[in-house]
Amino acid sequence: MMKNTGGYSSAVAELKNRQKTNKGAPAYSRFINRPLGRRLAAAAYVVGMTPNQVTAVSAVCTFAGIALMALAEPVWWVSVLVALLLVLGYALDSADGQLARMQNSGSPAGEWLDHIVDAVKIAVLHLAVLIVWYRFYEVDARWYLVPLLFQATASVTFFAMILTDQLRRQRQGVTGHFLKGQGTSSTLYSLAVLPTDYGLLCIVLAMVFWQTGFLILYSLLLVANLGFLVLALGKWFREMNSHD
């Protein structure tokens, strides 16, 4: 890897001017994860990393956190460590795309790799929660339906969002993230959809050690995500139908 001659501060400033639209972005992603990812992307740019290398580091952090949650007893420090690993993995997930825009090195292969890592993450994260509940929680077996339903909700939401985005790009004949008609979302909207933010889920996972509190918060997040999915599917279908 070759180091870049530009300094870290100049890289941060340049990345700030290359941000994709925050249209529809929940509050954590918009105000915390993207700025944190920007700083990580700047550091990766200075040391000469590629976006795929950043994606790989993101995957290591994320799956290490998921594995730790599934395998270790959920004492407080383990739960906090799990959350920190997931938060770092999520920030690096933002950094790889920002680095690609900085280097003008975005590619279908890089986007594919990023989405595959996200898909695997979504497929196994809630299974790790189910394992924790089965191994360490004293709950009625019917509670196991909650993480299973959350997994299904998250998987369908991810697929629907990716498919809708691809169809929008195809219709407008663009390959980047800056689609016509997209701008910014209000702060109020970003706060309203905060419960659907993966970053918030990462923070909530720091409370896995507290059975009662985590059961309640995790279940409330499921309700919010399921409600969002129902509303979003209707909106996206109408949007796609209008393209005919």
Image (cartoon, rainbow, N blue to C red):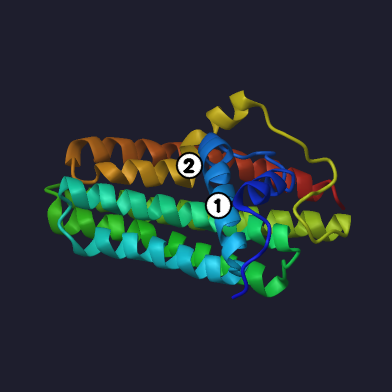
Q: Residues within 10 Å of mark 1 (few under 14, many from 20)?
A: many
Residue 19 appears in view: no
Q: Is residue 80 left or right of residue 44?
A: left
**Sequence-first tag of 2 and 1:** 1
How far across and down, in percent of the image, does residue 80 sit? 26, 47
Dividing the picture into quadrants, the one containing residue 228 is top right
Q: Say which residue label 2 marks.
A: 225
The three-letter amino acid code for the residue at tag 2 is: Asn
- Quick check: marks 2 and 1 in contact, CB under 8 Å? yes
Secondary structure of residue under mark 2: helix
State whether residue 22 is above or below residue 157: above
Which residue corresponds to the image point at 56% horizontal and 35% vertical from the top-left? 31
Out of 157 and 197, give the one closest to the viewer. 197
Q: Where is residue 46 drawn, in percent x and y? A: 60, 61
The label on residue 157 is: 1
Q: Residue at x 68, y 57 (%)?
A: 6
| Residue 112 relative to residue 105: left or right | left
In the picture, the quarter occupied by the N terminus is bottom right
164 to the left or right of 74: right
Report the residue at 24% width, 49% height from top: 79
Kind of residue at badge 1: Thr
